[in-house]
């Protein structure tokens, strides 16, 4: 059974193994690119090396034939069948001739199916000895094609998983950076918001202490006013700290199915919206 590995390495290993063991002129493996409805040459050996990365439309006659017949296509058998058709079978003969003309130099096309869909095609050039492909060759190639299809699917899934891990890692770095910036901004803003009322409180306390040290009489209304401002600023700090507790409930969004992350930007905006307007402006009250 073929083991999981990177797709390019896997296909290169398969083509090298086939061309060496079966002594072929060329081997090419085409893999379906479902997003663009085409087949791309992902690996080739022998004369097929120069075809790597070449793309062919999914409407190519060979692929359509393989999808409907669901069996290997042999160039020699196709030519023989064309010769056997009578003159009355003009339409079928024309279709087979068009198919043969589109076979290029490959001798055999072996389809690989998964969940009822054509996923890949192994194209084989003729044997170096000039011999035709026998029943043992067909059985071997069919088994190989089935295993190759499954291995390709597993390799593709592994590549998708690696890409998902890479995206998550990049997101984590980005999130950490955003979090650092957000925390820095929040700490600066918080320092400003707390310093303003503390300045007012300190000014009032220093004023009252000076009055007490001087042992001068202080009008009741003045004392009451100073204490009222101090109380107001203390309540302002308490309200600010209470509103900042909203950071403990961050905004969470789903990045991909099954993966939720904290939206740092929205969490900060949510916290900022919870701060009263007069505190966001950094106003201080002095008497």
Image (spheres, helix red, strand yellow):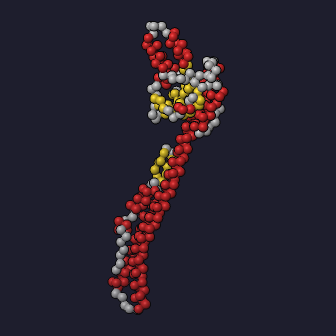
Q: Position of residue 111 (x, y in %)?
A: 55, 25
Would residue 80 be visible to someone looking at this image? yes
Placement of the N terminus among the 4 image quadrants: top right
Q: Position of residue 71 (x, y in %)?
A: 55, 21
Residue at 62% x, 31% y is: 16
* Front residue (pair 283, 115): 115
Q: Position of residue 92 (x, y in %)?
A: 46, 13
Residue 15 sits above or below residue 205 on the image: above
Placement of the C terminus among the 4 image quadrants: bottom left
Q: How many marks?
A: 0
* Front residue (pair 164, 57): 57
Residue at 42% x, 64% y is: 243
**Which corner quadrant of the image does residue 238 belong to?**
bottom left
Side of 23 where 101 appears, left or right: left
Q: Position of residue 215 (x, y in %)?
A: 41, 92
Residue at 51% x, 35% y is: 53
Residue at 43% x, 90% y is: 213
Residue 231 sits above or below residue 164 on the image: below
């Amino acid at each position: 059974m073929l083991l999981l590995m990177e797709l390019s390495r896997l296909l290169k290993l398969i083509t090298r193994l086939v061309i060496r063991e079966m002594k072929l002129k060329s081997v090419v493996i085409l893999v379906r690119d479902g997003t663009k409805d085409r087949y791309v040459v992902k690996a080739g050996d022998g004369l097929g090396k120069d075809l790597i990365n070449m793309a062919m439309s999914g409407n190519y006659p060979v692929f359509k034939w393989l999808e409907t017949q669901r069996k290997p296509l042999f160039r020699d058998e196709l030519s023989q069948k064309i010769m056997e058709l009578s003159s009355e079978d003009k339409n079928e003969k024309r279709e087979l001739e068009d198919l043969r003309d589109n076979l290029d130099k490959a001798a055999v096309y072996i389809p690989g199916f998964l969940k009822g869909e054509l996923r890949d095609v192994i194209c084989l050039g003729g044997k170096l000895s000039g011999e035709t492909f026998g029943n043992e060759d067909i059985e071997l190639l069919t088994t190989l094609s089935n295993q190759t299809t499954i291995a390709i699917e597993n390799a593709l899934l592994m590549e998708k998983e690696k890409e998902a891990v890479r995206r998550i890692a990049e997101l984590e770095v980005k999130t950490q950076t955003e979090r650092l910036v957000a925390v820095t901004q929040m700490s600066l803003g918080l320092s400003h918001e707390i310093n303003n009322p503390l300045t007012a409180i300190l000014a009032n306390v220093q004023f009252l202490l000076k009055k007490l040290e001087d042992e001068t009489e202080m009008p009741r209304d003045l004392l009451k006013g100073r204490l009222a401002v101090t109380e107001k600023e203390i309540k302002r700090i308490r309200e600010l700290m209470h509103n900042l507790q909203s950071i403990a409930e961050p905004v969470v969004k789903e990045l991909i199915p099954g993966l939720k992350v904290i939206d740092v930007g929205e969490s900060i905006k949510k916290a900022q919206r919870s701060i009263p307007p007069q505190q966001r402006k950094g106003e201080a009250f002095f008497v």
